[in-house]
Image: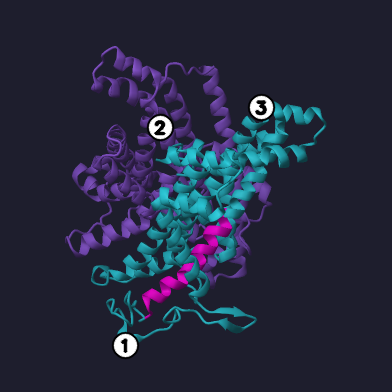
Amino acid sequence: MTGYLIRRVIGAMVVLLMLSFLVFMLVNAVPGNTLTRLLNQSPQGANLTPEQIEQYEIDLGLNKPVLERYGDWLWNAFNGDLGKSFATRLPVWGEIQDRLPRSIQLVVMATLISSLLAVPIGVFSAIRQGGPGDYISRVFAILGLAVPNFFLAVLVVTFSAGWLGVSLSTIDPPYIWDGVGENLKGLIAPALVLSASLMATVMRMQRSTVLEVVNEDYVRTARAKGLNERAIISRHVIRNSLIPVITIFANQFAFLISGAVIVEFIFRIDGIGALAVRAIRQVDFTLVLGISLVVGFGVVFINILVDLSYAWLDPRIRYS
Amino acid sequence: MAAATDVAELALHTRGESPGFWTSWGRHARNKPLGAIGAVFILILVVAAIFGQDINVGGSTIIPGFSPYPASETDIINKLGSPTFPHHIAGTDSLGRDMFSRIIYGARPAIIIGIVATGLGILGGLLIGMVSAYAGGITDLLLQRLSDAFQALPPLLLMMTLVTVLTPSMTTVILVIIIFLIPGTQRVVRGTVFSTLENTYIEAARTIGAGPIRIISRHILPNIMAPILVIASVTIGGTILAEAALSFLGLGANSANNPTWGFILFEATQRGNLDRWPWLAITPGAAITLIVLAFNLLGDALRDVLDPRLRGTGAGA
C-alpha cells in the first residue's frame, strides 16, 4: 500500500512537472514580445520610455532565455513562491489563495448535490426500469447533457432578476466562515447550475451499472436465500454499482472545474475560474501558470484519492 | 422485439441474402426513433450550414443562401423587436439584426467545427494510441505521461490558453479542440489495441512474418473501428459545446460576417434587462442545446446498433 502510494505520488509529480513545462512554453510562445502585449493591455503602458521598458524586462526576468526562466520559476515554485502577477504585481499565490475557498466550496457543493440526487435517482430509475419515473429521469438526464452550462447560467441569472426579483449575479458571497447564510444564498444557484451536467452523467451511469449488477449471480443467490428486496438493493446492488460511478466523478472533475470557470464568470463570483478568465485575457502569464499548477494539483490529487477509495468499496482490490 | 429482428436478420444472412442498405437502416430507424429524430434534425442543420448563406467561389456568389436576411444586416427601426411572423420569426437584436438569420449563419461554423475537429481529433488519437500501444517501452511511457499532463488541466483552461496564444479564428479553434480530444481518445485506442494484441491470431500473423504495418492495418484497425465510430459520434456534441463555450468567452470561431451561436448568446448577455427580450438568449441557447441533443441521441443509437459491447459503459458520455 505504502509502496503503491509512493509510486503514485512520484507519478503525480512527473505529471505536474510536464504540465508546468507545457504551460510555460505555451504562454511564452505568444507571438510578439510578451512585454509589448502586456503593456498594450495596461493604461500607462503606452507612455513608457525605452529605458523604463528595459527596466520592466529586467524586473520580470524577461531578458533571460526561456529555459533559464523556466528553471528559475520551477526553483521558486518548489520553495512555495509562484512569482508575481504581471498585471497587478501582487504575489500569485496570494491572488489564488484569496479565491480558492469559494471555488472549492462551489465544486464541493456541486459534487454533493449531484451525488445526493443523481445516485438515488439512478438506482430508482434502474429498479423501476420502463416505468414513468425511469422515463422522466432519463429525459432530464439527456437534456442535462445537452444544455450548455453557460446557457443555463444565463437563464438563471436573467430570469431570477427579472421575474422573481432576486438578483443572483451581483452578490459576491463572503467566505462560508464569515456568514453561512449569505454565503449559501450566493453560492447555491451557481452550484445547482454547475451540478446539472454532472448529475445527468452520474444518473445515466448509475442506472446502467445497477441494471448490470442486478443480473449478477450473487444477487440471485441473495434473493434465493430469502433476503428482502431492500436489503438486496442497499447491501448488494448499490455497493457493487458504485465503483464505475466513482470513476465518473474522478473523470468529470476536470470538466467540473471547466464548468466552474464559466459559472463563476457569469454569476460574477470572484473565484479561481473568474481569475483564470481574467489572467488569460490579460496574458498575465505568471498568473496563468500558477492557476494551472494549482488546478492541475487538484485534479491529480483527486484521481489518487479516487483510486484509493476503490479498495474501501471493493475489499478484493488491494494495492501493492 | 429487438431480439426478434436480430434473429430475422441472422436468418437472412445465413440464407446468403443480406438486407439492402436502406432496408437495414430503415429498420434501425424504426427501432431507435430518438436516434432517427436526431439524425433528421442534424440533416436539417447540415442543409442550413451549406445553403443557409451564400456559397461564394472566387468572389462571386454561385448559390444565394436561403436565410431571410444577411446575418449582419441591421434594421435599426425594428431593433429589439419581439418575434413576428413572417418578417422576424425569432425577433431582432439590439442592432435590429434578424435573429433567425443569425442562427442560420451560426449553423455553418458549428457543423464544420463539430465534424472536422472531431474527425481529426479522433484520427490523431487513433494514430497516437496505436503507436503508443505498439511501440511500448519508453515511447509508451512518455506519451502516456504527456497525455496525463494534458488531462490534468481542465479542458476549458487548456483551450482558452491555447486560443489566446494562437489568436482566435476558425482554424485555431479546430486545432485546439483536436489537441483537447487526442489524450482521451488515444487512451481508449491504446487499451483496445492492447486487448486485441492478446489474441492468438495476432501471434499467428507474427509467426508467418507479418510486419507491424500489416498487423495494424489488417488485424487491429478492423477490430477497433466500431468503438472509434461510436466515440466519434458521441463526441461531436461535446465538440460543439466546447466551441460554443469558447465563443461565449470571446475566444471562438466568431467573425464579423459569420456569428457563432456561443457569441450570439454572449452578445445577449451584454444587453441589460435581458428578461424583457428573452429571445436574444433563448434562440442561440436553444440552437446549441438542440444540436447537441441531436448528436447525443444519434450517438446513443449508433452505439447500440454498431457496438452492443459499449452499451451502458458511458463511453464519451
In the rendered structure, the residue with mark 2 lies on which chain? A
Asked if badge 2 and badge 3 are on a common chain, one would say: no
Instruction: State which tag comes first along the sequence, 1 or 3.
Output: 1
Residue furthest bottom in the image = B77
Q: Secondary structure at mark 1?
A: helix
Q: Relative to residue A160, is residue A262 drawn left or right?
A: right
Labels 2 and 1 within one chain: no
Please give the chain letter of the residue carrying mark 1.
B
Q: Which residue is mark 2?
A: A246
Comparing A144 with A94, the one in front is A144
- Element type at marker 3? loop
Which span of residues is magenta-colored?
B97-118
Q: Which residue is mark 3?
A: B198
Which residue is identified by label 1?
B77
Residue lying furthest top? A225
Q: Does the magenta segment cover residue B54?
A: no
